[in-house]
Every structure is written in structure tokens, then in C-alpha cells.
Amino acid sequence: MQSEPGNPGSVGFIPLCVPQIQGNEWKYLKECLDTNWVSSVGSFVDRFESELAAYIGAKHGIAVVNGTAALHIALLVAGVTTDDEVLVSTLSFVAPANAIRYVGAWPVFMDADPAYWQMDAVKTLNFLETECIWENGQLMNKSTNRRVKAILPVHILGHPCDMEPIIEAARKFNLTIIEDATESLGATYRNNKVGHLGDIACFSFNGNKLLTTGGGGMIVTDNQQWAERARYLTTQAKDDPIEYVHNEIGYNYRLTNILAAMGLAQLESINYFIAQKKAIAGRYNNAFSPEKDITLMARNGDTDPVYWLYTILLGEDVELEYRKSVIRQLNQQGIGVRPLWHPLHGLPPYAGCQAHRVEHANRLYARGISLPSSVGLELDDQDRCIAAVSQAVQQ
Ligand SMILES: Cc1ncc(COP(=O)(O)O)c(C=O)c1O
């Protein structure tokens, strides 16, 4: 697939979103090779953890093999366990729902708000107020009789969720907030960075993310106990490193020094990466603004998004098949576009799970197209994308 994470595609093809490698990546990687510090410990791991955490404003960072592993461990350290429930965005990549199942818990899917496409905070509060009840000090879902333990908002496409009502709801109902911030590194909500708005947060550094280590992830939190536990669980729950004593089931989830070296070098360029993403979004916004059949990506006034993946919606009444045909046509013309994710509550593994008043996510999926958004997207190539999209929607 030409639009798989980080795939540069063939000659003439404009990829969806590929890495920008421009700084100290070669130097730091060479240092790993020259010194033989290539594996799961090393100074680059420590530096990447502390510098990424500092960038977010968090006290602790724990580097892991990928964003999905970060979510898995974040759920474990937050105490989410078998038959708990976690409220999660239905319009999201599948990883957070899968991670919820890894710990034996169940997702309850929340709708996307129609204006900004993020987890609908109002409906989330409504679910808690109308569908849940306190029993013996625990918040129980009336229809499943399971304990509701956490909220997992996914900040999609480089834009933050409307966090204040989500934070208020979490306080009121004694829930933990686990942010999936993988797509919105660097974005802010009311001047606070995404990833430092809840209790614990996760990032991914796979091939199409703002920063890439090829594959990698990070857990960030201010909670020292949770950070220590995350470090313990991700290093095979090793209690005595000499005698191989493991008192719990652990995971081999630590990021290697080689990949952390790449991450650190990428982090040094983050301001440039974000400036480029914003410039790309600005040009798309200008180009499509008179276009009545295209809805632009709106910005919530409380946020400063990073526009990780610039996305448009086709006309309000379009059918799913039409959107699919536009994507096919653009891909055939060498423009690497892709749809939004199939809403998770409609996927076979989650068909039996509760979805609360979902009205908008399916329409967003039917209408949404993500456009080429690489940091290094040349002006000429962006013009080509704009022309091709404008032509495709007019047919
Ligand atoms: C919202 C979201 N969560 C989690 C992930 C999982 O990250 P990874 O691919 O590093 O496991 C991704 C991306 O792939 C994502 O977009």
C-alpha cells in the first residue's frame, strides 16, 4: 500500500506522510554503533525520555517499542483490569480499543463531535450522568453492570479534544484520564500540551508520526509510582537482575538505544516540523475555502493544533461509495490520500460493545479524506494535490 506509514511510494507519487530526516540522526546513530550501545539501555534512551517528557511538561517519560505498547502499559499502571470499562473515542485508529482488550477491559465507544471530530465531551458526560450509577463506592454502567474506570480520549489528526469538560467529568465521577496523544504531539489545549492534560498519556513514533523512530512510543506522566511501575513492567518485571527473579508477568517493551537516538535527533527539529505542518494546513485552507463541496478542518479556539494529517470532508450528502471512488481516483493519480478510520464500534471485534448515542462518527468516516501532509511536502506537489482534489470533487 502506497499510503502505509512512512512509505515513500514510487517516483512521482506524493506520499501521505513520510519522515523528515534532516538533523543529528546520522551522528547519534553512528555514536550508538561506534560505542556498541545498540540495545535496550543507553544514554540516548535516558535523554529521549527526559527531553520528551520535559517538552510535554511532564515529570516522567518511559520509552517503549510502540504506541500500542504504551497504551497497554498505561492502562495497566492506571489500574484498569478485567471487566472494567473505559470510555474511548470511536473515531480513532484501532490501537486504543485493542489495548483496552489486552488488559481484559471493555471499551464503551463515544461519538465524535461534528465540528472538530474529536471525542464528544458533552455526550461523554451525558453517558456518565444517565447510564451509570454509584454502587458501593464504584461507578457502574447500568446496562452492563461493569465498573467504569477510565476515559481514554484520542486527540486525532493533530487536534486536541475539548478537555475541560472531560477533566470535569473525570473528577466528578472519579475516573482516570489516559490520553492517546499519539497523533497530536506538540498541540496545545488552553496553552497546555496534549499529553499533559490527564493522568497519563501515550505517544507513538511510527513512520508517519510527527517524530519518528521507525517504530517506537512513550508513556508520560507526573505520577512517580506509575512511572516506576511502567518501567518495571516494560522490562520484563525484573526484580533481581542477577538471579532472574520476576515476581509478576512483565513485557519486553523497552525502546532500543538506537531508536531513542533517532528520536532525540527528531525531537531537536520539532518546532520546524510543526511550523511546516501549519504552513501546509494554511495552504490547503486557502485553496479549498471557496470550494462548497469541501468542509475544512476547523480549529477549536481553545487549541493550537499541529495539523499532523490534514483532512477534509466531502459534501454533506455524499455516499460512502463516492468517497471511496474519490480516494481510488486520487491514489491512481499518484496522490497518497486515505480515509478516516472505520468507526471502531462497527468493527467485528467490537460489534458487541456499547456505543453511546453515536450519530456523527459514521458520517465523518463516509466523508473524510486525509491529504498528503509530509513535513517535506514541496509547494509544487501540494499544488498538484490541491488541483487533483478540486477536480475529483467536481466530477
Ligand atoms: C491514535 C493512535 N493510537 C495509537 C497508535 C499506535 O501506535 P503504534 O503504531 O506506534 O503502535 C496510532 C498509530 O499508529 C494512532 O494513530
Image (cartoon, rainbow, N blue to C red):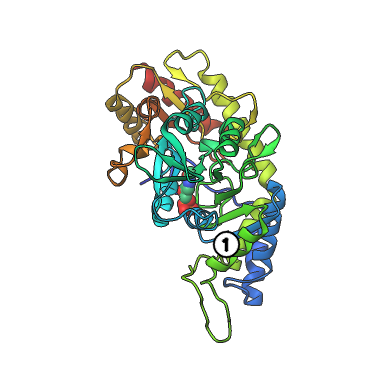
Q: Using residue 331 as the reference point, say whether residue 114 is left or right of it.
A: right
Q: Residues within 10 Å of mark 1 (few under 14, many from 20)?
A: many
- Which residue corresponds to the image point at 51% horizontal and 75% vertical from the top-left? 247
Front one among 356 and 348: 356
Q: Report x, y in % for residue 95.
A: 43, 49
Vertical position of residue 298 compared to residue 261: above or below: above
- Which residue corresponds to the image point at 39% horizontal and 51% vertical from the top-left? 83
Tell me where residue 354 sits by quadrant: top left
Task: Find the residue positioned furthest to the front.
Answer: 136
Q: Report x, y in % for residue 128.
A: 47, 33
Tell me where residue 283 sits by quadrant: top right
Front one among 5 and 67: 67
Vertical position of residue 287 compared to residue 230: above or below: above
Q: Using residue 108 as the reference point, say whether residue 117 is left or right of it.
A: right
Q: Report x, y in % for residue 121.
A: 52, 30
* Label 1 SS: helix
* Pointer 1 residue Cβ closer than 8 Å to ligand 1: no
- Which residue corresponds to the image point at 38% horizontal and 28% vertical from the top-left? 358
- Residue that mark 1 sits on: 230
Front one among 389 and 316: 316
Tell me, yes or no, if residue 13 can be seen here: no
Task: Find the residue positioned furthest to the bottom.
Answer: 243
Vertical position of residue 253 compared to residue 288: above or below: below
Front one among 278 and 379: 278
Q: Amino acid at mark 1?
A: Ala
The quarter of the image holding the C terminus is top left
Count up the numbered dots. 1
Tell me, yes or no, if residue 198 can be seen here: yes
Q: Report x, y in % for residue 368.
A: 41, 28
Tell me where residue 322 sits by quadrant: top left
